[in-house]
Image (tube, rainbow, N blue to C red):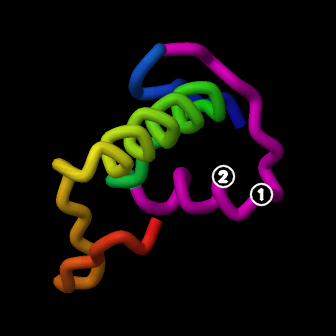
Amino acid sequence: MRVKCVICDTINQLSDDLPLAKKLRNRPIHTYMCPTCHDRIKENTDARIATGKFIFYKNSKLIENEF
């Protein structure tokens, strides 16, 4: 299955047997993000959390200093 990253528009190939491929086929609201973009966003988010000015809500609860 050919997939396109929503951020950088690179085209990657996924095996049809992967759960992610099935999710993308059956639910059009789900989007694909390449590993490079995913890692970059994760690093930037972790850096923002480390500044202490970023409030991270998870399951409607405020999580402080858990990271």
Task: Give the residue number, with chain letter if any, for mark 2.
Answer: 21
For residue 3, side relative to residue 43 (left or right): right
The residue sitting at 46% across, 15% down in the picture is 8
55 up-or-down from 62: above or below: above
**Between residues 35 and 5, which one lies in front from this camera angle?**
35
Q: Quadrant of residue 59?
A: bottom left
**Which amino acid lies under the numbered mark 2 shown in the image of this protein?**
Ala
Which residue sits at x=33%, y=53%? 29
Q: Nearer the viewer, residue 5 or 57?
A: 57
Above or below 55: residue 28: above
For the residue marked with disc 1, what is the amino acid? Leu
Residue 31 coordinates in the image, percent (x, y): 43, 44
The residue pinned by badge 1 equals 18
The residue that appears at 38% across and 52% down in the rendered structure is 28
Within-10-Å neighbours for mark 2: few <14, some 14–19, many 20+: some
Q: Is residue 19 above or below residue 11?
A: below
Please tell me whether mark 1 sits on a helix, a strand or a loop. Answer: loop
State how far apart marks 1 and 2 are (Cα). Answer: 5 Å
Residue at 53 percent across and 52 percent down: it is 24
- Would residue 36 appear left or right of 5 to someone viewing this image? right
Compared across the picture, whether 45 is left or right of 13 comes to left
The image position of residue 1, as x and y in percent, is 71, 37
Percent position of residue 10, x then y = 57, 14
Q: Secondary structure at mark 2?
A: helix
Coordinates of residue 66 in the picture (x, y in percent): 42, 73
Q: Are marks 1 and 2 in contact (CB under 8 Å)?
A: yes
Nearer-the-camera pick, 54 or 20: 54
Q: Is residue 16 magenta?
A: yes
Q: Could you say which quadrant of the image residue 60 lies in?
A: bottom left
Q: Which mark is on residue 64?
A: none
Q: Dot 1: few (<14), some (14–19), or many (≥20) neighbours within 10 Å?
A: few
Magenta extent: 9-27
